[in-house]
Image (tube, coloured by chain):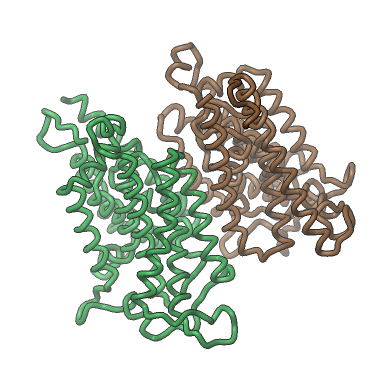
Amino acid sequence: MNSGEGNPVKKRKLKKFIHDVYIYAVLLVIVLVFSIIGAANGAPWFGRGHFLGSASIISMARQAAPIITLACGFTFVMVAGYMDLSVGSAMGLTQVIYAIAVRAGAPFIAGLAIAVGVGILCGIVNGIIVAKLRITPVIATLVTMTVFKGIAILLVPTGISAIKSTDTQKMPAWISDYGRAKTLFGLPPAFYVALLIVAVIVIIQHKSLLGKYAQAIGGNRTSAELAGINTVKYIMLIYIITGILAAFAGVAQASYNSLGNPLGGTGFETDCIIAVLLGGTAFEGGEGSAFKSVIGAIIIICITVGMLTVVEAYYQGFLKGAILIAAVSLNQILNKEESMV
Amino acid sequence: MEKKKLFSSISDESFVILFMTVIMLVVFGIACIIVPNFGTVSNIFSILTNNWYLVVLGIGATFIVKTGNMDMSLGGILAMANVLVAWFCQGKDAQRPLDIGFGMNFWAASVLTILLCMIIGLINAFFIAKLHVASLIITLGTGFLARGVAQIIAHGSQRSTNLPASFANLGKGFIRGTPVKYSVVLMFLILIIFLIIEKKTVFGRTTYYVGANKKAARISGLKPDLHLAALFVINSVLAAIVGIMLASEFTAGFASKGQGYEFDALCVTLLGGTSVSGGFGSVIGAFIGTMLFSMVTNASGGLLLSPGWMYVLKGSVTFFAIIAQRIALDKRRSMV
């Protein structure tokens, strides 16, 4: 800070630099902390039982696929200044439908296609309510969150909690391959698909009109409309993308657990919000990077997995709240400094 | 601020509440016909009284929503109060860690619990009023934080052992000779107090002004930020009171208590005609909304529908209520 005193250009550059890289620093610090804790507990570095050991990394990659997939697409929603609280429920709904399809004998691709179809439908419903009927996004998606959750629960026969193998209908053994099989470097296919999705979303954000228009809508919807942008169409598109990604996340989770849990996505909307905020997207919208949201998602996974080695599972809720509040504060500080420059 | 129209002497707010009351009566009529045993006196009584906690939470939520904000930390604060009060009242001498408490008097424990829950309200207030953070996001965070406290204290489950017998007096008690529980009396008491605050005090009118136009409120010499802060603290106190009453009623503190209540509270607020963009709404609406809400859940229970239907019905009713209110208001305005 002191070096930049009296030199506004240098100061601004420094702040932009901090804004650009802080998320990587946070990730690095967290990984280091858990690594040192692991080493202090007697595990050899990068070895068995260590935070950076191969087993630990594979386990993290398996769990990370759904949240990575969702968080990068969620960036669009928040950049445009909107909100989607229904992603978790959409994830639950799509994974239930995927599990039903697969159990009934559908091959993987067909199951995925059906799930994505349902995800698109969820996105269209959200888009119509928010963009066409102009109901406040938070309220609208709270409503669809309840409805999607209800439908997902309805699809599961009463008396059991999830779609799984029964005496009459067996879940095929390959269902867990997508989320657990060891392919390249021992990581599951779902993780590579998630990386592919991230690449596509990052390209969409930087190279397509959708990315620019999302920013414009987030900056000021009315002026975006006056500038000739078909805001209804683009908001619909953003919700549809989120729906598709919810389907991919749902399939990844169904495969990881080998069952279709209607409540499997509970809390994912909060995780997405945390990830996107950690990635530096302002909640007023207008600016944000999908890639940084992914880093935010990885931070969440590192913390949840890492903390399990240190404390009991029931500390998770407190921790999640603390991270969210920290993310909000960090976001606030950085964005405020920028606007003061 | 209320917009008085030439068309009629009643305000938009009263109009919407009247409209929702009519809808409630229609739903009641239909339910009486299709749901077995819906119209019996005992069932009507249970509809009126079973959801007392939702009325209290809805009253708090109405004040918050009127300013164009929302509070998603209600459920978390409720759980925190639920567990804390049980913990404070548990006896000191026990073997298992989950049985050991502080052996405090119930009333002292309640006051301490409310004070601790106010801390969560103060965090909300600080971020929303001072830093101007979106209320949805910060209250999501503090909701997790508060529930996290409950989970840590209850070790992820509940504290229900080693409680003194007097612990249940308040929650399980009835007014002598009547089937009316103390909690229902409390509900009506809070309803009346907040109705007076809303309609007759400067504080209540400020809420409307801040919701309708924050900038104008500031320019006219009010302190909208301070007002918002006060509202969030009040809301945390209401949630804490509900949590304490529920702990006493069930003689246990559950870490999972109140999951989703923030959404239910928002639902009844919207069903009661409070505008999401802020500016109008009334605690009477929250009461009407809760009655409509309990009719829907009660009817779906009477028809033996699965919990899935409950969610679908809840969501759809809220959605159609919002749409119906908007159409009714537009019609009324275009008739002027």
Residue B161 at x, y = what percent?
Answer: 50, 82
Residue A105 at x, y = what percent?
Answer: 75, 48
- Please give the letter of the chain rendered in green: B
User: Quick check: can you spot residue A92?
Assistant: yes
Residue A61 at x, y = what percent?
Answer: 78, 47
Query: For residue A137, which quarter of the picture?
Result: top left
Q: Residue at x 52, y 50 (%)?
A: B141
Query: Relative to the observer, which residue lies in front, B321 or B155?
Result: B155
Q: Residue at x 64, y 47 (%)?
A: A97
Residue A138 as seen in the image, left or right of residue B12: right
Query: For residue A13, which quarter of the picture?
Result: top right
Q: Tally the numbered discs.
A: 0
- Please give the letter of the chain rendered in brown: A
Q: Residue at x 77, y 58 (%)?
A: A37
Query: Relative to the observer, which residue lies in front, B274 or B95?
Result: B95
Quadrant that contains the N terminus of chain B: top left
Task: List the single residue furthest toward the top.
Answer: A227
Query: For residue B275, which quarter of the picture?
Result: top left
Quadrant that contains the C terminus of chain B: top left
Residue B55 at x, y = what percent?
Answer: 30, 58
User: Quick check: can you spot residue A104?
Assistant: no
Q: Residue at x 12, y 29 (%)?
A: B7
Q: Is residue B196 above or below residue B66?
A: below
